[in-house]
Structures are given as C-alpha cells and as structure tokens.
Image (tube, rainbow, N blue to C red):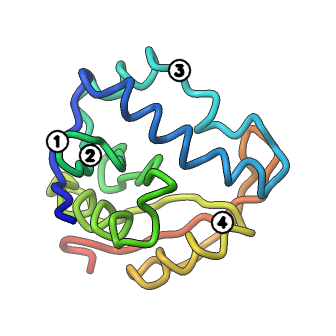
C-alpha cells in the first residue's frame, strides 16, 4: 500500500467531505451526537475553505482520496483542522503522516500549532500526544461536546 500525500484543492471538496463524514460518523456515535461540526459542514463551505489558499492536504491510495487535513493560519498560530481518515484505512499511519505534513506546510511565521479533539477520543488524544501536542485547556463545541485544546510549538518557538 503506497499512500501519496499531496495538495488538496477546491476540486477535491466533494471527495474530501465524503471522507470527512465517513471518518466522523463513528465519532458522532461515540458521543451520541449526530450534529458534530465536521458532519454539518457543507460542500460549498469546504470548497470555499479550499479556495482560500489555506494549507490543505489529502492522502491518496492510487486515485482514491483516503484522508485529508486543513490548516488555518492566523499570524503566529495555526489551527490543525478536520484531520480525517477513511474508516477502512485507519490504523495504517495515514493520520500520523497527514499531521506531520500539515505541520510542515505551516507558513514560516507560525510558532504554535493548535487543535481540538473530544475529551473522550482516546485514540486521537494519543496520536496528538505522540506527535508532541500537550493539552493546554478545554472548550465546548457547537454540539455541546467537551473538547480538549492541544498545542505544539514549532519553528522559531520550538
């Protein structure tokens, strides 16, 4: 299995949203909440995000998109958002590779990467911990789910 990581453009919005939905449906079941923000995002909103020139990467197995991730830079900080891997492809290191790739794609001014994940998402929390992220706080998402806020220093701040 050779998975290629490469740029994700607006033309990939439909495929990326399909992967995102497939990846987040089990999360929604875990939290008993069908309206998680990644499941309510529309293809138009995703296409607009991808058209805005933000760092966005996909993972392809041949021609099939099997994962994606976006970065949302804001000065010296960048949010790592919507890391998604197709359920049948999870556990193969694709999420770890996408995370490393989006970190490497951060603009030079970025000194801190941050992200959120559910406090009961043990697998995600472990992935981020192994990648050097630390919990720095908490929040509640639009669906009312308790979220852990994680950060990692990069660039000149590392």
- Separation (CA) of disc 4 from disc 1: 28 Å
Residue 131 image offset from top left, x and y in percent? 38, 79
Residue 74 visible from this viewpoint? no
What residue is shown at x 25% (from left), y 46% (from top)?
Answer: 57
Q: Nearer the viewer, residue 87 or 80?
A: 87
Residues at badges 3 and 4 in contact (C-beta under 8 Å)? Answer: no
On screen, 5 above or below 53?
below
Specify which label sits upstream in the sequence, 1 or 3: 1
Q: Nearer the viewer, residue 148 or 44?
A: 44
Query: Which secondary structure, mark 2?
Result: strand
Task: Give the residue number, with chain letter if any, for mark 3.
Answer: 42
Residue 133 visible from this viewpoint? yes
Residue 124 image offset from top left, x and y in percent? 56, 69
- Separation (CA) of disc 1 from disc 3: 20 Å
On screen, 67 above or below 43?
below
Question: Which quarter of the rendering shows the C terminus?
Answer: bottom left
- Separation (CA) of disc 2 from disc 4: 25 Å
- Separation (CA) of disc 3 from disc 2: 18 Å
Instruction: Tell me the mark number nearer the camera, choosing from 3 and 4.
Output: 3
Mark count? 4
Task: Give the residue number, with chain letter if any, for mark 2.
Answer: 58
Task: Give the residue number, with chain letter if any, for mark 1.
Answer: 7
Q: Is residue 41 left or right of residue 138?
A: left
Q: Is residue 3 left or right of residue 136?
A: left
What residue is shown at x 77% (from left), y 58% (from top)?
Answer: 30
Residue 32 image offset from top left, x and y in percent? 85, 49
Specify which label sits upstream in the sequence, 3 or 2: 3
Residues at badges 2 and 1 in contact (C-beta under 8 Å)? Answer: yes
């Amino acid at each position: 299995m050779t998975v290629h990581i490469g740029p994700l453009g607006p033309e990939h919005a439909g495929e990326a949203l399909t992967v995102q939905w497939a990846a987040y449906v089990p999360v929604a079941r875990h939290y008993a909440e069908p309206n998680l923000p990644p499941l309510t995002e529309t293809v138009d909103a995703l296409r607009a995000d991808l058209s805005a020139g933000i760092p966005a990467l996909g993972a392809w197995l041949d021609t099939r998109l099997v994962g994606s991730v976006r970065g949302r830079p804001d000065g010296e900080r960048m949010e790592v958002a919507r890391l998604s891997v197709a359920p049948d492809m999870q556990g193969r290191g694709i999420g770890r590779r996408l995370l490393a790739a989006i970190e490497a794609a951060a603009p030079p001014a970025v000194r801190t990467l941050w992200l959120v994940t559910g406090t009961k998402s043990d697998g995600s929390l472990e992935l981020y911990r192994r990648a050097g992220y630390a919990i720095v706080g908490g929040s509640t998402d639009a669906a009312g789910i308790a979220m852990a806020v994680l950060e990692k220093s990069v660039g000149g701040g590392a």
